[in-house]
């Protein structure tokens, strides 16, 4: 499964869903109804699975409008939700496929916790509901990147035991049930977690979350703007809101038409101009950023490309670099509306054309 929730982690769902389909993925993972519509409007008919518990409103919208949404498989974690879905299925005269979520990965977000009294009974009861069909049993890990391999293996084994119990007690056939537990970090750290399917987002987009990630991952996103204006300021001046930077020499600042509202953390440190790593002076403003180009000001012209994420000359800035230097969690580094920006996600062009 390729996970393309949140605009494919801001890489652009519209492009990447087609690339994923062409690459031969079996499943698409989403969270929002609007993402289902986008995928269907691209003509993609792959199975879609929602990766969080949906609200009743989301459920009735999707499952009462199959002609628009197609079939969407739902992750379920309590009996009430299953009853509601089965009722929707009955009204529409159809069977809704579900994936039973278990709390083996300790997210305490979506899954039945097998240590709770009543969980096993609830699962047996949902298996008897007429208009839902159990297509999968799954879990999701809270600390796949940080927990020790030993702890993770123990939880993976617990998931397997619980899933097997459901299959045998519920009279299901093993081959009819997809077991899936791993997102990116777990998939690369614990091969035993692969079961029948892995659900990958981060590493699909070329971002390393753990040191065990495969070598040669290429970050597919690049983010760049241009030099808007060039301004001279004297030694001793302070720069930007909060005056967090003081110029230690007469300086030239490149003023960029890009600020934190366009997506990067306010304390982003570096950019690339003319293949050189240059310092951002002070904090990013909402809609502007000042970059110290004193050392290279003779080469720099208005309109020159400025790279925040990606490669220029021999220098590269990765999303991990920004995460590390700003103390911002990896998945929060880019909150970009790609469509609004001079940001370009580079896709294999040939694949998109196909
Ligand atoms: C977001 C999500 C994923 C993808 O996670 P990555 O670590 O980015 O690969 C997989 N499974 C579930 C349930 C998710 O919510």
Image (cartoon, rainbow, N blue to C red):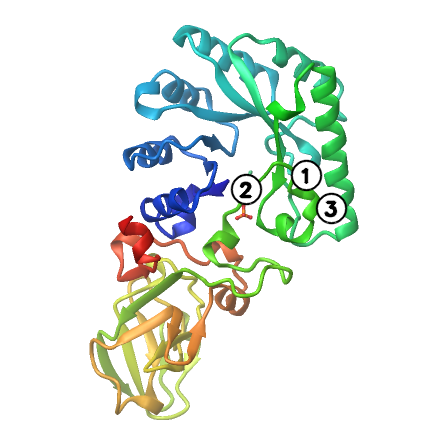
Q: Nearer the viewer, residue 80 or 188?
A: 188
Does residue 226 sit above or below 340 in this rendering?
below
Q: Is label 2 within 8 A of ligand 1 (CB to nearest ligand atom)?
A: yes
Q: Sequence-wise, which precedes: disc 2 or disc 1?
A: 1
Marks 1 and 3, how far apart at CA? 8 Å
Q: Residue 192: percent from the left, percent from the top?
A: 71, 44
Q: Residue 235: percent from the left, percent from the top?
A: 36, 91
Picture quadrant of ligand 1: top right
**Res 156 → quadrant:** top right
Marks 2 and 1, how far apart at CA? 14 Å
Looking at the rendered structure, which numbered label has been put on residue 105? 1
Q: Nearer the viewer, residue 20 or 122?
A: 20
**Res 305 → quadrant:** bottom left
According to the image, label 2 marks what residue? 199
Q: Residue 123: percent from the left, percent from the top?
A: 66, 17
Looking at the rendered structure, which numbered label has been put on residue 152? 3
Q: Are marks 2 and 3 in contact (CB under 8 Å)?
A: no
Q: Is label 3 within 8 A of ligand 1 (CB to nearest ligand atom)?
A: no
**Res 259 → quadrant:** bottom left
At a point 51% along the width and 10% down the height, the residue shown is 131
Label 3 CA crowd tier, 10 Å (few <14, some 14–19, many 20+) = many
Q: Can you tell which of label 2 and label 1 is closer to the viewer?
A: 2
Q: Nearer the viewer, residue 12 or 18?
A: 18
Q: Can you tell which of label 2 and label 3 is closer to the viewer?
A: 2
At a point 75% along the width and 52% down the height, the residue shown is 149
């Amino acid at each position: 499964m390729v996970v393309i929730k949140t605009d494919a982690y801001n890489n652009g769902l519209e492009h990447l869903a087609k690339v994923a389909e062409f690459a031969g993925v079996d499943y698409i993972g989403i969270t929002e109804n609007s993402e289902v519509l986008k995928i269907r409007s691209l003509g993609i008919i792959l199975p879609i699975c929602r990766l969080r518990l949906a609200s009743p409103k989301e459920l009735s919208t999707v499952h009462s409008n199959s002609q628009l949404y197609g079939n969407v498989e739902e992750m379920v974690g309590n009996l009430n939700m299953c009853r509601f879905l089965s009722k929707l299925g009955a009204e529409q005269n159809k069977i809704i496929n579900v994936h039973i979520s278990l709390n083996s990965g300790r997210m305490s977000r979506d899954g039945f916790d097998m240590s709770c009294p009543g969980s096993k009974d609830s699962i047996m009861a949902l298996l008897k509901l007429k208009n839902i069909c159990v297509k999968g049993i799954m879990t999701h890990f809270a600390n796949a990147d940080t927990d020790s391999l030993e702890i993770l293996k123990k939880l993976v084994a617990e998931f397997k035991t619980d899933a097997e119990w459901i299959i045998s007690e519920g009279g299901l056939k093993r081959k009819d049930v997809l077991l899936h537990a791993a997102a990116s970090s777990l998939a690369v750290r614990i091969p035993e977690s692969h079961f029948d399917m892995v659900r990958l987002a981060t590493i699909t987009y070329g971002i390393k979350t753990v040191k065990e990630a495969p070598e040669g991952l290429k970050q597919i996103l690049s983010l760049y703007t241009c030099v808007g204006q060039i301004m001279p300021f004297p030694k001793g001046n302070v720069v930007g809101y909060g005056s967090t930077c003081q110029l230690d020499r007469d300086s030239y600042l490149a003023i960029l038409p890009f600020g934190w509202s366009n997506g990067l953390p306010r304390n982003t440190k570096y950019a690339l101009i003319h293949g050189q790593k240059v310092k951002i002076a002070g904090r990013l403003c909402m809609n502007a950023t000042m970059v110290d180009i004193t050392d290279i000001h003779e080469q720099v012209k208005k309109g020159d490309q400025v790279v925040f994420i990606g490669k220029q000359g021999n220098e590269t800035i990765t999303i991990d670099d920004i995460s590390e230097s700003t103390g911002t969690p990896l998945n929060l580094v880019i909150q970009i509306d790609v469509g609004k920006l001079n940001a370009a996600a580079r896709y294999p062009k040939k694949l998109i054309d196909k």
